Amino acid sequence: MARIFFLLIAILCGTVLAGQNLLAQTTAPVGSSDSATAKQKRKEEIAREKQEAAKQWPTSNQKALETWAAARQKRRDCQKQASERKLYFTKRSRFLKECLAGKTS
């Protein structure tokens, strides 16, 4: 009987201590307001950098966009040719690779 009573007290104390540890983990640290303002400033700085990059983006990447558009058009043309030839599965993928490489007309 004494063993059971002692066991119940030990379990009760363990749950109370575990609850205190959980509460200690959920509370905010004392110096969190300083880090919060620093984080906010960093977020604003990142937002400004993104806006500046977005302003410069259309002119700096025009050639890349044209290259990408040409590649997409070539892929569409190759896919259309594969459909016209009624190629499926492995033959289709092989044909697309060759067509995109310029080996097939």
Image (cartoon, rainbow, N blue to C red):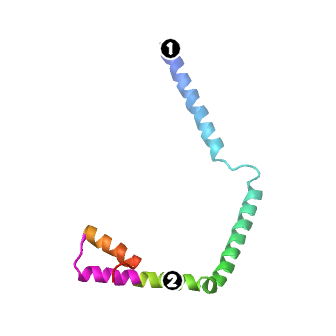
The residue located at (32%, 80%) in the rendering is: 79
Q: Whole-percent x and y of residue 102?
A: 39, 79
Q: Whole-percent x and y of residue 50?
A: 66, 75
Q: Whole-percent x and y of residue 89?
A: 26, 68
The residue located at (26%, 80%) in the rendering is: 83
Q: How many marks?
A: 2
Q: State yes or no: discs 1 and 2 in contact (Cβ < 8 Å).
A: no
Instruction: Decide whether residue 82 is among the magenta residues.
Output: yes
Where is residue 100, by image quadrant? bottom left
Q: Nearer the viewer, mark 1 or mark 2?
A: 2
Distance in Å between CA atoms under marks 1 and 2: 80 Å
The one nearer the camera, 49 or 40, is: 49
Given the current orientation, which residue lies at the most extreme front position?
103
The magenta region covers 74-88
According to the picture, the residue beneath numbered tag 2 turns out to be: 67
Tag 1: amino acid: Arg
Where is residue 91, by image quadrant? bottom left
43 to 68, vertically: above or below: above
- Give left or right: position of 48 versus 103: right
7 to 56, vertically: above or below: above
Tag 2, which secondary structure? helix
According to the picture, the residue beneath numbered tag 1 turns out to be: 3
Instruction: Decide whether residue 46 is among the magenta residues.
Output: no
